[in-house]
Image: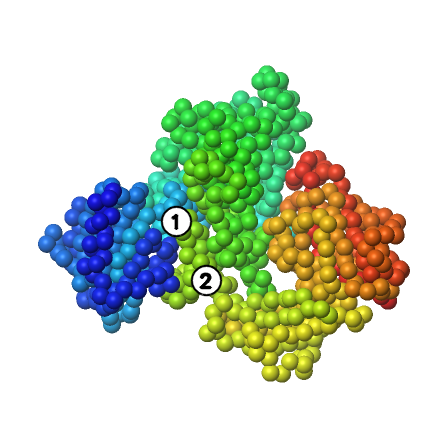
Amino acid sequence: MKGTKMRFVALVIGVLISVSCGFSQCPIIPAPVTFVTAAGQFSFGEDIAINSDNAPSGIIDYAANRFTNTFGIRVVISPSAKQLVFKKVANVPTDYYSINVGETIIITYSSDASCFYAVNSLFQLIQGNPDQYSIAKCFLKDYPKFSWRGLHLDVSRHFFTVDEVKRYIDLMALYKFNTFHWHLTDDQGWRIEIKQYPKLTEIGAWRDSTVNAHYSTTPRTYTVEHTGGFYTQEQIKEIVQYAANRYITVIPEIEMPGHARAALAAYPELSCTGKQHGVEGLWGVFDDIFCAHESSIQFLKNVLDEVMVLFPSEYIHIGGDEAPKTRWKKCAKCQAVIRENGLKDEHELQSWFVTQMDMYLTSKGRKLIGWDEILEGGLSPNATVMSWRGFDGGVDAAKQGHDVIMSPGSHCYFDHYQSKNSTEPLAIGGFTPIEKVYEFNPIPSSLTAAEATHVLGGQANLWTEYIPDMKQLEYMVYPRALALSQVLWCVEPPSFEVFRSVLIKHQLNYLDRFKVNYSRAMCYPEMKVSRKEDGLGVVFTAADTSDQLSLIVRVDETNIAPKFPDFLIGKNILSFKRGIDSVVTYRFEVKSEYMPKPSEFKMTIHPSIGLNVEYITAPDERYNSGGNLTLVDGIIGAKPWKGNEWVGFDDQEIEFIVDLGKKTKIDRAELNFLEDIGSWIHLPNFVRISVSTNGKKWAFLPDKPIYKAQGCGKHLPFAFQIQKKARYVRFKIVTYDTIPEGMPGEGHVQWTFLDEIMLFSK
Ligand code: ACM
Ligand code: ZN
């Protein structure tokens, strides 16, 4: 080890003339461990002579293809070549490589995968245009932090062709991802040919309708069209090999016991009721799941037999998430399995079900992975957990000595919105901007160093309910995937500001070379709202300071407001005073060179903007991006929700106090609640309001029940009569005990989402 380190030093000193150092100058993402530049550059001619030594021929072919196809540089391979030389080294960290660019280019590598990573880094260093390509002289060394650097793709909700999946893999390879989690089965389509069960693809791969608009929008409407598709076993082998050539392991996911409607459409006898349903055209969680009787278990083992032949991966993913127990509770066959195995309840039955698969896969020398629900009812002995409902499931599993992959919705769900911009395409909900992805650390501080060794790495998931094609797929994944690749690769990731500047300066051009339809959300103008003593301040900013922004303001959707003639983006603060008793809506249109259309921001000025709000009950940190300003920031929570304008709680009692600053006549309050049953978000049961002049003695008003009919499930706020003089208004929101049986999330405490509190004096 020591000897190797010494050699690096010698190499570096040999190259450097004037030294500067730092990640901000390194165009590579994920950033290497060390990067040092020197004066001068290596210039490419029409061809390049490569001495490949014993580097894998597949990698040399890959490099040759890219030299030729992207840069028009011909490759000559020769053992005496000096221009680009590969050398294998030992006694270095796992997957270590280095690149030394001087008068020649020397690549050292320690494994086949690291040789491939080196080639990919080399291509990111090349600057220039067809007249002259070059690389600034530099030395870098590099190796990854985590061994699991994954991207997932759901091909059930929308089908993607073999060529599209290959492109997904190609782009992953550019950023050193090494695990492709292929979600092959779900309620809306079974996508893998299984020879023993031909109906899985004859019937299960096709649906006749697909819900359009957001699934929470009612009444629902459907596009009636026979759509779907599947991969033959030959095509699967081809994709697995294609990925292997790029040092990417494909992990198949066969969902069980839930998300099984497509399989049950083909073989209804595998369900508890035996009833025939079609392949589902709606998104969500469905009650009909695999029955736990022996014939379903045997069916799934037979399916896994064929899966294991096609996928050489150590891990096989069996899903395990979102399996309602409604049918199992009423099924004589399932209840018999519970009795015969001395199980306590249906959660233990799910654990038993997963254990059957675990024992089977283990007996074949493979390892089972499941979503974190597999912890419920007891974790199967050899299972690895993929933690998606936050970090807690992963922490729990690691503390129990199980391996873990972190993939929390808060940071790793690329089906969430990535900007607040009104031009964003429809998404499922949630808000995961690139900054949030960059904050991802798969190792929570609650793990000891020993427990942390169970965290294999992290992964982003791409569920495709609202992603119908490749263009939108790329928009959702890029450039967020670059942030993920950096935090999974780098032992010490550079700051977000450095990452963003490298991204804008170097990587957007690089993605352009591959014609990637990436999002420019990180360059979009943002509206930032702050509390002022008498109301709110609003400022517009953009991440890229070279961007020219301009602003049009409209009032109540119609007139162009005359108020802000010489507005300077990023400098001026627009001030809005409260104190009026009416509600005025401003609409801001901000034009940016990065945007096809102006960004639109809406702001509702009302009598409570900027008032002080004190939370007695702390909101969930995932749904509290605006702190205690959100309820009075003039930005009204959108429906369907985009995850950032609402304040979310998973408590049964929620309390907060609004301070009007002085004793004031209050006629009524208005408050919005969100309802999205599929996301476990329900209206509360009742609200108890009390008022006070000194914040100590409170006068209580009668409890007000919340009825859907009164508007709060729709787009109307719920109104509370107050008719008192007071300085403080205290709200206590009380929910129902738990989510009722038969609904998504049954038995759990409901989520309650609030936004914009308005207090009117007349
Ligand atoms: C999941 O998002 N249901 C794993
Ligand atoms: Zn059953």
* Precedes in sequence: disc 2 or disc 1: 1
Please report the residue visible at 81 percent of the width from the left and 49 percent of the height from the top: 687
Residue wearing tag 2: 497
User: Residue 154, how many percent across, how many down?
Assistant: 49, 46
Residue 504 lies left or right of residue 129; in this view the side is right
Of residues 656 and 591, the one nearer the viewer is 656
Disc 1 element: loop
Please report the residue visible at 16 percent of the width from the left and 48 percent of the height from the top: 53
Disc 2 element: helix
Of residues 422 and 283, the one nearer the viewer is 422
Please give the count of numbered marks on the rendered protein.
2
Whole-angstrom CA distance, mark 2 to mark 1, is 17 Å
Check disc 1 and give the amino acid type.
Val
Classify 10 Å Cα crowding around label 2: few (below 14), some (14-19), many (20 and above): few
Residue wearing tag 1: 491
Check disc 2 and give the amino acid type.
Glu
Specify the quadrant of the image occupied by residue 716: bottom right
Residue 292 lies left or right of residue 520; in this view the side is right
Residue 392, labelled with which disc? none
State whether residue 106 is above or below residue 301. below
In the rendered image, which quarter contains the N terminus?
top left
User: Residue 94, how many percent across, how many down?
Assistant: 31, 42
Please report the residue visible at 63 percent of the width from the left and 66 percent of the height from the top: 529
Residue 333 lies left or right of residue 663; in this view the side is left
